[in-house]
Amino acid sequence: MTIVRGTVVTMNPRREIINDGAVVISGDTIAAVGSFAEIRTAHPDETVSGQAGDLVLPGYVNGHQHLTGDRLIQSSIPDDLPPGEAIFSWVVPVHGEHSGDDDELAATLTLAEALSNGITTIFEAGTVAHPDRVVAAAQSVGARVTVGTWGWDVDEGPYAGTVDEVIDRQRSALDLQGGPLVSTWVSLVGHDLMSDELVVAASELARSRGVGMTFHLSPTSSDVDSYLARTGKRPLVHLSALGVLGPHVAVAHGVHIDTQEVAVLVDSGAAVVSCPWAYLRLGQGLTREFRHLDLWREGGRLALGCDAENAGDMVDGIRTAALFAGVAKDAAVDPTVFGAHDALELLTIAGAEALGMAEQIGSLEVGKQADIVVHDRSRIEWVPPSPDPVLQLIWGSDGRSVRDVYVAGEPVVTDGRVRTVDVDALAAEARRAGRSLRTRSGVEAVSRWPIR
């Protein structure tokens, strides 16, 4: 057993915070939560990690993260490109050249960064060429990961195919064995790059296998325009009519949706994963079309995501949660409508619920998986400590104050360093792989200002 000490933000149904509290890890689960004095009395001989001033929380949930492609060219795609050019002039060519080695290396680096910032559960966004290599990366890093692979039946593009070919690829990915921390979902690229036949077949596959399904939809208005032209209906209304939506579905983005589509989401139980940094970085209109707040107000299922290293760039859940809260306040012109505590819920228990994992993760409760994050509150940004640790966590801190992380009871980050892989040793390999990938795909980053 291990005792993790600190101010414990439980995220339990009563949202209790325990000053000088403790969490007991037994195997891969949480055995006890309470005051440190009580826990120490009950377990006088067990190892204690941390101190009273630390902040202890459940591991953070990242509901949408591209684990391959962007990482090896991170923060390289210019942020002033016209809509669509970043995807079709950069992302698609890069993905088309991604090797299995590239996939594993990129996923390893992204997952290591996620863990170092307190993200213990990551849902891949569905653009992995070699899912077996990403499973291998997840196993080596020790993160809790749901893996998806490419799925689209457009006329051309990397890994596009017929409906049967795409479904066979999805089925093969679902059959991968990754151990207790790795699972697989049905994943489509989405947008208007999936036929009705494909999205219906994919949803039926997910239902039959008892797994989730995700796809991208309406980050900009182009999907709306395309669906209206093709079907006469807005995207989510059309997908609802096809019988595709349900609690097994997590829609990535859903920025440009209207009141009827919000109602469709609530009624169907389908979730939305909001990636606010991506929309601001790419100029996709979040501040004009912030229906995610409406979905939250109506009791819809909502989670947060960091997206990709050329969209959200940093894989940091606290940074993402703070931005979402700020946009919510500003869009509503009402500081009372949404706050730091609501944002932390989306990053933990509400996000876990939206993605179908609330029975396992998302809060520090007896019997749940021991996914635990410890923030070091001796750092300068925490001095002096606020009487409300959640307020200070969201508005005054970020993932850089994470010191220790446990996944299923295993210490994966200690003293701010990932224990499971040697990130320093991967740095030279990552530089070489990035240069090679740029050359093979024909993309090249150029600084806007001259560098001497």
Image (cartoon, rainbow, N blue to C red):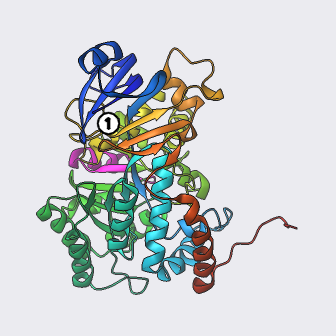
Circle 1: is it few (<14), some (14-19), or many (20+) Cα within 10 Å?
many
Name the quarter where the N terminus is drawn: top left
Q: Does residue 360 appear left or right of residue 392 in this picture?
A: left
Question: Does the magenta-highlighted stretch encompass residue 37?
Answer: no
Q: Residue at x 48, y 75 (%)?
A: 102
Q: Which residue shows up at 44% across the image and 72% down it?
A: 103
Foreground residue among 332 and 147: 147
Q: Return the residue found at the far right.
A: 452
Residues in magenta? 255-272
**Residue that carries the numbered disc 1 in the rendered image:** 349
Residue 257 lies within the magenta run: yes
Residue found 35% across the figure and 17% down from its top = 36
Q: How many marks?
A: 1
Q: Which of 335 and 238 is in front in this view?
A: 335
Can you tell which quarter of the image residue 297 is in? top left
Relative height, residue 446 to residue 163 (above, below): above
Q: Which of 175 and 161 is in front in this view?
A: 175
Residue at position x 41%, y 55% from top?
64
Location of residue 198 (image quadrant): bottom left
Q: What residue type is labelled 1?
A: Ile
Q: Which x, y percent locates residue 43?
A: 26, 21
